[in-house]
């Protein structure tokens, strides 16, 4: 990493979140000037604390569903603001719909005004509870628009449609990434997603809660691999959507057992009801990513990623959790 010629000045929405904070670090390491907007709805200032003194970093506590104003040029806007945990789908349904629709609209308007490249953080949730496995980008999905996950799935599908409309109608230069389950340091201990729940419970010696019988699958990608893929997508000519994720699919029961093993925990696994519309399988087809992102594929094995993440959760919980 060094000093990049492009992009020089970048706005990251959701910059204080889990993925956003990793992205800000990577962009700074590439020599970019970074502006992060975040209303701290599900993010934390601690995620970007070390960046606050950086000469090329600026943070604004701001809700991006409102009119966006940035002084001076912008080369790229990376729109990552949105709660992402299924636990938030019931807690924050309106905020999720607003940031996916109004927030995307505002960020696209700013991209148009600044002639900046716009990169949308979309999601594997666009595929809903898929009837095709693995999921290629050409699959249109199986989403229940009025179910509890619908607020997130439909907001992201709307965001993709809005992004493509700005691209086709206004000529805005866009990229769309469909992110599959990603994990790593700076996930919130209590955000309700499977990996933080399993680590918190296992480290504390509490029961590990498996929803359903645990046969449902996901494919978990370590955050550094995702960030590398996003950086390559930002710098390539392919509009997308492009799946980025780890094609290694595993059951949630296997993940719970792995986390119990890695934490050397004596916790036992207990089952809880499966939430409605919970996808039964999920696995990215990354053929397109390999092709257009210069042979990109995940480099960090899940076990290695989990060990790094374990160190983070152990220190977070020792510091009192949150
Ligand atoms: P996160 O909750 O840690 O980060 C989201 C950030 O957006 C938070 O800091 C939050 O405060 C901020 N935010 C929410 N609404 C906002 C608003 N109206 N104005 C300004 N800021 C706002 O979640 P994450 O896992 O880092 O996800 C980041 C992005 O990646 C999201 O768009 C999510 O949909 C997408 N994504 C994540 C995953 C994953 O596995 N982590 C998978 C698919 C897609
Ligand atoms: N899950 C679980 N126990 C938990 C939290 C989640 O078994 O304590 C399951 C959840 O039902 C889903 C999978 O783990 O099948 C992944 O859930 P997560 O919330 O991480 O994200 P999703 O992939 O569903 O968006």
Image: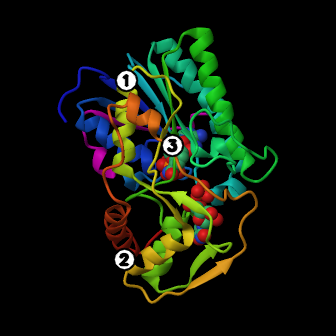
Disc on res. 236: 1
Report crowding for label 3: few under 14, some 14 to 19, many 20 or more residues within 10 A (C-alpha).
Answer: some
Q: Residue at x 19, y 28 (%)?
A: 3
Q: Residue at x 44, y 17 (%)?
A: 116
Answer with mark 1 or mark 2, whichever residue precedes in sequence: 1
Q: Is residue 106 visible?
A: yes
Side of 26 relative to 67 (left or right): left
Q: Closer to the camera, 157 or 33?
A: 157
Vertical placement of residue 239 versus 245, above or below: above
The residue range painted magenta reads: 48-67
Q: Residue at x 31, y 55 (%)?
A: 300
* SS for callout 2: helix
Residue 100: percent from left, percent from top = 64, 36
Answer with mark 1 or mark 3, whichever residue precedes in sequence: 1
- Disc 1 vs disc 3: Cβ atoms closer than 8 Å? no
Mark 1–mark 2 Cα distance, whole angstroms, equals 37 Å
Residue extending farthest to the right is 146
Q: Nearer the viewer, mark 3 or mark 2?
A: 3
Count of numbered circles on the image: 3
Q: Closer to the camera, 289 or 31?
A: 289
Residue 53: percent from left, percent from top = 26, 43
Q: Where is mark 2, residue-wise? A: 262
Q: Residue at x 29, y 23 (%)?
A: 8
* SS for callout 1: loop
Q: Closer to the camera, 290 or 102?
A: 290
Disc on res. 285: 3
Side of 3 relative to 159 (left or right): left
Residue 237: percent from left, percent from top = 40, 19
Residue 266: percent from left, percent from top = 45, 90
Is 193 included in the stretch rendered in magenta? no
């Amino acid at each position: 990493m060094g000093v990049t010629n492009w992009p020089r000045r970048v706005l990251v929405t959701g910059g204080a979140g889990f993925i956003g904070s990793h992205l800000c670090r990577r962009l700074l390491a590439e020599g970019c000037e970074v502006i992060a907007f975040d209303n701290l709805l599900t993010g934390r200032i601690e995620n970007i604390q070390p960046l606050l003194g950086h000469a090329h970093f600026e943070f604004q506590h701001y809700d991006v569903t409102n009119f966006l104003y940035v002084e001076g040029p912008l080369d790229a806007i990376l729109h990552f603001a949105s709660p992402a945990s299924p636990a938030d789908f019931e807690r924050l349904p309106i905020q999720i719909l607003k940031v996916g629709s109004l927030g995307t609209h505002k960020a696209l308007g700013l991209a148009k005004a600044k002639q900046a490249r716009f990169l949308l953080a979309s999601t594997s949730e666009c595929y809903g509870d898929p009837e095709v496995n693995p999921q290629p980008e050409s699959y249109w999905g199986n989403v229940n628009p009025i179910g509890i996950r619908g607020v997130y799935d439909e907001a992201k599908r709307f965001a993709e449609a809005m992004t493509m409309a700005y691209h086709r109608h206004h000529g805005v230069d866009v990229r769309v990434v469909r992110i599959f389950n990603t994990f790593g340091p700076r996930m919130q201990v209590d955000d309700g997603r499977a990996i933080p729940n399993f680590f918190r419970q296992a480290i504390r010696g509490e029961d590990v809660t498996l929803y359903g019988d645990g046969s449902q699958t996901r494919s978990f990608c370590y955050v550094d691999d995702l960030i590398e893929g996003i950086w390559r997508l930002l710098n390539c000519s392919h509009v997308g959507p492009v799946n980025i994720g780890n094609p290694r699919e595993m059951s949630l029961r296997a993940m719970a057992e792995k986390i119990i093993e890695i934490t050397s925990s004596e916790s036992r696994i207990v089952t809880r009801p499966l939430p409605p519309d919970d996808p039964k399988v999920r696995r990215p087809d990354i053929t397109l990513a390999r092709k257009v992102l210069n042979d990109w594929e995940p480099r960090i094995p899940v076990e290695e990623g989990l060990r790094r993440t374990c160190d983070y959760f152990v220190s977070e919980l020792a510091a009192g959790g949150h």
